[in-house]
Image (cartoon, helix red, strand yellow):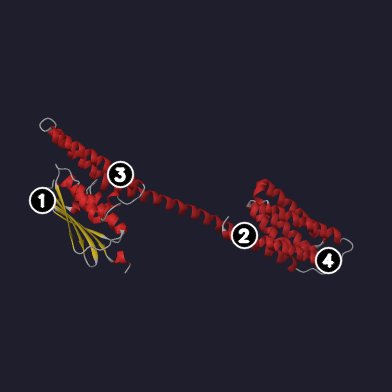
Amino acid sequence: MTRTEGRIRLAMHAGFFLLLAASASRFVAGHGLDGATPLVLTLTGVLGAGYALGVAFWDALGRHGRLAWLGAVVACWLALVGAAPSFAWCAVPLFFAALRLLSPRAAIAAVVVITGAVIFAGLYLADRVDPSLVLAPIAVAAMAAVIFLELQRLVGELVRTRGELADTQRAAGVLEERERLSREIHDTLAQGLASMEILLQAADRQWDTSPADARRHLRQAADAAAANLDEARHFVWALAPPALASGSLLAALGELAGAGPEAGPRVRFRTEGDEYPVDVEVQAVLLRVAQGAVANAREHADAATIMITLTFLDDAVSLDVADDGTGFDPGAAASARGRGYGLRAMRDRLAEVGGSLAVESAPGAGTVIAATVPREREHGE
């Protein structure tokens, strides 16, 4: 039940009891406490108590119990209208109760019966025939029925829309999580697996000729596997990269430069500008971009050297990863099927922190990946 629907029901219940009390007071004022008054007041008490019990135990009654309750309440009210026509004032809350519980066809029939009782009461009290005593109750009943049925339709649409919105948000959350995992796998596990592949291939080549070197490569592959396992555990729990857990971005990038396999390209790291504090989220994004760029250079570029440069500018933090490999056509890679995911993941990561990515490359000319995040974001300027 929506909050609006709850307020409408509360208003109807309060209106019923107020109108019931007003009708009883009018009857007592006009007839005193003699004659049929005790019977009318007894019926009034029974109607009020029955109505209150139905409201209090609404959920426990179930559908069949509520229908029985409505029938008993309307029957008691009809008896009161027959004895004291002023009780016809309670008709509108009963309209809403019938429209709420019954199917549209049955509800209209109930409204017709209740309206007929109101018309009978008005004509019974009148000393002359007045068309307004017939037309007014019909108009009120028609307006109440249309308004309530329209409210029910709007509430139903609201509930459906809310459910559809929740489904959409849930689906968006699933897609966002899949995208996050895809980026993490590409930027971390892919790099680690590529390093292990290079180390194991080197160990295989040196197994007979240089057992000591082969064992060293195997140990390095085992270390890479352990580091990858640590990365996997962290990104599954959406934590910061483990390389940032106990140090700064500079230390993490230095570790990245020194963690490559001996058989692969040489990775260097340098900084430019005066270091200043950088938001942890931005540090994590820049580290992931560096990891992804290094992994791409190792796997695809056939590079001899990879240079990582972190620059602290006055208005931005810039990360460049340059290699002297084979290079590629950025436009062709973006449109090629199954290629370009790494660059798209980098752009998505940087967009989340207000940054941007630039790619400079050409076949045979190496590649430069440049990531920039405005410094204003860090200081809330």
Under mark 3, the amino acid is Asp
Which residue carries the number 2 mark? Answer: 148
What amino acid is found at the position of numbered circle 2 in the picture?
Phe
Q: Quadrant of residue 73?
A: bottom right
Q: Disc 4 versus disc 1: distance between alpha carbons?
A: 104 Å
Depth check: 344 or 87 in front? Answer: 344
| Nearer-N-terminus badge (1/2) | 2
- N-term mark: 3 or 1: 3
- Closer to the chain start, of discs 2 and 3, is 2
The numbered mark at residue 52 is none
In front: mark 3 or mark 1? Answer: 3
The residue beneath circle 4 is 28
- Locate the N terminus and report the quarter of the image it occupies: bottom right
Question: Which of the 4 quarters of the picture holds residue 250?
Answer: bottom left
Judging from the image, what secondary structure is the residue with disc 2 in? helix
Q: CA distance from mark 3 to mark 1?
A: 36 Å
Q: Nearer the viewer, mark 4 or mark 2?
A: 4
Closer to us: mark 1 or mark 2?
1
SS for dot 1: loop
Left or right placement of residue 104 versus residue 283 in this view: right
Labelled disc at residue 364:
1
Residue 180 x/y as whole percent: 33, 50
Q: Earlier in the sequence, mark 3 or mark 4?
A: 4
Give the residue number, with chain letter if any, for mark 3: 230
Element at badge 3?
helix
Amino acid type, callout 4: Val
Disc 3 to disc 1: CB gap under 8 Å:
no
Work out whether residue 326 can be spotted: no
